[in-house]
Structure formats: C-alpha cells, structure tokens
Image (cartoon, rainbow, N blue to C red):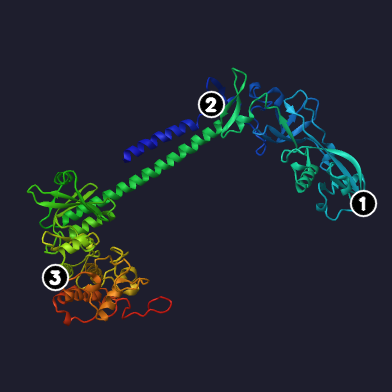
C-alpha cells in the first residue's frame, strides 16, 4: 500500500510539473485551431481592464481583435481612439454585456460636465450612446430639502460659477413644471449620457428619485459613459455569459468561436493537481503512520508472547482458523471488540473463534485476554484453548458454550420460562459470584473484569455459567486498594458511579461488585436496568428506576413474585434482591466483597440484613444544587 502511494505521488508530481511549465498551448475546438500565446489577455495597469478579443492592443497581432476595436496604453491608462473624435480613457470592459465605460482622457476636474461631448462612433462597431434630456434650475435660495422634490438633484457646486450667488439644480424634464419652487427659474436644457452602472434613463420608471440624484452627482464629479458594441456581428455575448467560456478568433475561418477559458482550465488543472498532491501526501503520511503503528503493535504482541508462558494454549495460524471455521461460515455473535464464529478442532471438539477487530485498542484486548484466562482454570471462567497472532490478525479460541449467553434467557420470556426456575436462577447467580470471587482472590494478582453483564456470561450444556470477554480487564496487586484508569471502562448501565466521577469513590474490585448487582436485578426482573418501570405495582403516570422500586417493595414487605411474574420460591427472589441491593450501594465502601456475597447467597433469608436505600448514598448528602458533598 505504501509503495503504491509513492508511485501515485511521483506520477502526480510529474504531470503537474509538465502542465504548469507549458507556455504554448495548442487548443482544439472541433476542427478549429487557435494559437493561444500570440493573443493572451493584457492590461495597461494592475487595476486596468483586461483587453482581449474582440478588442486588441495596438501592440498585438492583427488577428487578435477587430481593426475598429483597437486600444492602446498610455502610461497606466487604457485609451480608446475613435475616428473623428477625442481620445477616451477606458475604465471597464464588460464582455458579457458587450459594454465599456469611457471618460474623457483630458478633462478639467472643476466641472467636467461641460467638457463631455457625445463620442462619434461612425465607421466603428460601437452603438451611439443614449442621451437623456435634463433641465437646469437657477435658484436664489438653497432648497432646504431636495428629497421633498421628485427627480431633483443639487446644488451642483461646479455649475455655480456660471451665476455667482445662485444655486444650480438639475431636474427631470418630464416632471410637472408645477413642482418647481417659486425661488427657482429654468435656465437651460442639458443632456446626460447613460452611465455603465445605471439603467437607460428613457423614462422615469427605470430609476428611483434617490438613484437619479446619485447618478447626477456621480456624473457631475466625473462623467463615465456606457458605450456598447455591436455583438450581432461578433456573436460573442452568449458565449461570454457561459461559465468559464470566452470568445476567441479562428485564424483559418476568420470567424469567432466560443472557447472554454484556458486560464481557468490551467488554473483549475494546477489547483486540482496541487490538491491531489496534498491528498496523496496526506494519504501517504497516514498510511505510513498506520503502518508504523501496526508494526509496533505486532512487535509488542510478539514480544509479549515470547516472554509470557501461556499455559495449555495452542498458537494457531490464520490458515488453521479458516479451516476449523470452514472459512468463517457460521457467525454466532458480534461484540464490541470482535466477531465470534463457531468452529471445530481436528479431534471434533466444537470451539468458538473470536476474531478481534483491527481497531481493538492497539492489541490491548488480545493481550488482556491471553494474560487473564490464558493463565487460569476455573469452572466458572471460560477456557482459552488457543490463540492466533499473524500480522494484523488476532484471534482467540475458546471452548464452545452450547447455550450461548445469559442475556437471551433473562430478556426473553420464552427462554426464561422454559429453563429458569428460581432455584436454577440462584445456582447461576452463585456460579457467577464464585467466578468473580476467584478473579479477585484466587490468583497471584487480582483480576478486575470491568465488564460484567449478561452478554458476557456464557452457559454450557448444563447451564453452568462461565465468565467471558476479558478485553477490558486489568491486573493489580491484592494489597492495592484502588486502581487508576484514564477513562471509564465497561458498558453503560453496568458502570459503577465511581467510574463516572472520582467524587463517588475510587475505582477498585468493588466496581465489579456493582456490575454483578445490576446483573442479578436483571435476572430476577427479566428486564434491562435502563428500562423505565411501568405496569404492576406502579401508577400509570409514574416512571421509576427499577432498583428504587425493588427496594420499596422489600421495605414494605410485599411479595416480589406477584409483580415480577417469576413464580416459584419467593424466599429466593427476596434473597437475590437483597444481595443485589447491597452490591449496588452508591459508595464502594458500603458494598460487600465477592467473598461475602458468596456467603450471603448461601445463607437463609432471615439472616440477611436489609440494605440501605441504594439511591440515597449513606456517606453522601445531595444538596439542592445537585452536587455531592
């Protein structure tokens, strides 16, 4: 993968270098050929208009534009010279509107209006500009509010020199003469040529009074006239309106044609190729980083396997796993860290093969599983028969449990009624408790599971429970009372309060005790602990947290089986409920050890002490702000 990425990167760099350094492009448009470098767009200054077909500068080749649309540069100015007329400075060229804005090249800034004459466009491809008639008003007093009069602009300071002490205003000639103030008299008529930024002023409906006043002020400051060219002879306006297209000229046919903008194409090619390079570089760095990371993980795992003695466990190859699972044909379960398939050893013994996901926390789950169940044997701990570590593939081979996981029995009415009596439920609970006790006390180091839940309790053909899935487990010395972890470990709903916040206590083996308590409550209720409690014994408008409700039932001396619909031995149901409530005490210090729990499960109900309400912690008080103290 890394080598392929390097090859793509090299090819991309070559292509970008080739196209970016090409200065002469031969463009093909159907059968038309256009030599691009002879007629490139030009500017007389940085902020001047771009000159290209149908225009050309006088320094360009004749085929670059029409003879009557020649422009020239004089300093930073773009100059238009018309036959029998003055020179004009070109301020803008709009190829989509076939229009350019022009001003007098040399003019007196004091009052340019007097100096602007209508350009002579005879014998050219330009259309004569549209003149607009105006009238001048000579007022003896300055008008207090020009906005009170429609289509009136002024006073025009540059015109006041004509009549010293008077104020000159410009008005719309078609306005009712009655609107003229009594202090004003009409002095003369004038004309205004249409500017490039306003519509033609043929009739009043084209422009508002405020726009009229702005046009007059702008034109008085420096007249800019819109000059349109005859596009019907050039046929370029429709082409220019297309996105990324512009009009060009064909040397062979002597006609214009529509060509996609090569500047945009070239810029697009450069930008696209640059983006591709960055993308490939990023991909290469990512692949390289992932490759090094995976290599480091493989080395750590191999180092672990070489230095750690896995008792009675066989190391299999990936080929062995494919053969024993018939190419992973039968999937029997999916977990957070891997997928489980049913397989068979060469001697016919059924096994469960768990293929760990590649994202399983850098091989931590694999190491955890091998470290824990690979070294212990207990009747209530699932047995590890073998493992596989080959490249990026890690797998674990367990003994196969015919009856699957506990959750399908306790959360399914059909299975639960068929297999579990209260006596059997007590046996299963006792087996799980003994398994957890062994993890906490039976090994050289204490093993904290951190993910006790029905899904991780497997049942063999005799319904003997086996604790499985040690991917989140941790080892710690027996004399260590707490454990430091960077983040909460486990499944939502089974996590002890201290997993969420250290304000509730320290993380220790008591966290497994809490999860076990939740599991027991789910066993006797047949419902998930996160489900709100509705129905028997609960008002229809009420929603209670199940542990709170079960505590109230016991505290009031009510029978559990009448509302739980479990039937059987009521004493066993109450015993399991009391043990579970002790396990889920808010403070870890108030929870019993697993050794004590095993003893409690074996005692008579009358010998068990009623626990405090687990919802109101005994060592914590909750103030009105909701913060613990």
Q: Note whether 452 is above or below 291 in the view shown.
A: below
Q: Which residue corresponds to mark 3?
A: 423
Q: Residue 24, labelled with which disc?
A: 2
* Crowd rating for badge 3 (residues with CA inside 10 Å; few <14, some 14–19, many 20+): few
Q: Note whether 255 is above or below 184 in the view shown.
A: above
Eye-nearest disc, 3 or 1: 3
**Residue 492 x, y percent position in the rendering:** 31, 64
Q: Which of the image's four quarters has the N terminus? A: top left
Identify the residue shown where x is 17% and y is 44%. 322
Residue 456 appears in the rendering: no
C-alpha gap between disc 3 and disc 2: 92 Å
Identify the residue shown where x is 88% and y is 39%. 189
Identify the residue shown where x is 25% and y is 55%. 335
Contact flag, marks 3 and 1 (Cβ < 8 Å): no
Q: Residue 183, labelled with which disc?
A: 1
Residue found at the very far top of the displayed protein: 252
Q: Note whether 198 is above or below 444 in the view shown.
A: above
For label 3, the SS is helix
In the image, 245: left or right of 358? Answer: right
Q: Which residue is nearer to you in this view: 341 or 421?
A: 421
The disc, 2 or 1, on the residue closer to the chain's N-terminal end is 2
């Amino acid at each position: 993968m890394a080598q392929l990425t390097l090859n793509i990167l090299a090819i991309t760099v070559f292509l970008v270098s080739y196209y970016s350094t090409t200065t002469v492009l031969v463009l093909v448009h159907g059968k038309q050929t256009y030599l691009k470098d002879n007629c490139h767009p030009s500017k007389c200054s940085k902020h001047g208009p771009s000159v290209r077909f149908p225009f050309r500068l006088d320094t360009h080749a004749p085929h670059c534009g029409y003879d009557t649309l020649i422009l020239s540069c004089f300093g930073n100015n773009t100059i238009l010279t018309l036959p029998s007329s003055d020179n004009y400075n070109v301020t803008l060229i709009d190829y989509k509107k076939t229009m350019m804005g022009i001003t007098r090249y040399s003019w007196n800034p004091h009052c340019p209006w007097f100096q602007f004459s209508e350009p002579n466009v005879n014998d050219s491809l330009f259309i004569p500009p549209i003149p607009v008639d105006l009238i001048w008003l000579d007022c003896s007093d300055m008008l207090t509010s020009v906005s009170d009069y429609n289509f009136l602009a002024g006073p025009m300071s540059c015109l006041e020199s004509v009549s010293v002490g008077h104020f000159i205003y410009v008005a719309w000639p078609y306005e009712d003469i009655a609107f003229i103030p009594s202090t004003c008299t009409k002095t003369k008529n004038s004309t205004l040529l249409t500017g490039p930024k306003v519509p033609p002023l043929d009739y009043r409906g084209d422009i508002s009074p405020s726009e009229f006043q702005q046009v007059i002020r702008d034109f008085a400051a420096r007249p800019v006239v819109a000059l349109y060219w005859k596009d019907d002879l050039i046929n370029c306006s429709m082409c220019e309106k297309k996105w990324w297209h512009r009009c060009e000229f064909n040397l062979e046919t002597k006609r214009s044609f529509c060509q996609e903008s090569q500047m945009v194409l070239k810029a697009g090619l450069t930008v696209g190729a640059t983006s591709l390079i960055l993308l490939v570089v990023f991909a290469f760095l990512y692949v390289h980083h992932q490759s090094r990371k995976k290599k480091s993980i493989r080395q750590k795992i191999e180092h672990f396997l070489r230095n750690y003695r896995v008792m009675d466990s066989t190391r299999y190859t990936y080929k062995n796993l494919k053969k024993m699972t018939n190419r992973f044909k039968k999937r029997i379960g999916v977990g957070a860290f891997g997928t489980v398939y049913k397989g068979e050893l060469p001697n016919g013994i059924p096994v469960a093969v768990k293929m760990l996901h590649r994202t399983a926390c850098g091989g931590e789950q694999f190491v955890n599983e091998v470290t824990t169940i690979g070294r212990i044997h207990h009747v209530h701990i699932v047995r590890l028969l073998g493992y596989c570590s080959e490249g990026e593939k890690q797998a674990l081979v367990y003994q196969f449990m015919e009856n699957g996981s506990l959750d399908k029995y306790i959360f399914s009415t059909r299975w639960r009624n068929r297999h579990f009596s209260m006596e059997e439920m007590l046996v299963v609970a006792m087996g799980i408790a003994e398994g957890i006790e062994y993890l906490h006390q039976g090994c050289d180091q204490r093993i904290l599971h951190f993910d006790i839940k029905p899904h991780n309790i497997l049942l063999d053909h005799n319904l003997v429970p086996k604790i499985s899935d040690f991917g989140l487990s941790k080892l710690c010395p027996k004399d260590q009372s707490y454990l430091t972890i960077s983040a909460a470990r486990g499944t939502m709903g089974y996590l002890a309060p201290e997993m969420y916040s250290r304000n509730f206590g320290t993380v220790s083996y008591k966290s497994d005790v809490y999860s076990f308590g939740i599991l027991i409550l789910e066993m006797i209720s047949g419902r998930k602990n996160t489900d709100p409690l509705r129905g028997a014994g609960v008002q229809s408008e009420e929603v209670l947290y199940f542990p709170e409700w079960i505590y109230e039932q016991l505290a009031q001396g009510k029978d559990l089986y009448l509302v739980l619909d479990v039937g059987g031995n009521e004493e066993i149901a109450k015993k399991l409920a009391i043990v579970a409530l002790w396990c889920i005490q808010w403070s870890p210090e108030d929870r019993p050890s697993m050794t004590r729990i095993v003893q409690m499960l074996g005692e008579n109900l009358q010998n068990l002490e009623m626990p405090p309400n687990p919802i109101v912690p005994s060592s914590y008080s909750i103030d009105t702000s909701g913060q613990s103290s």
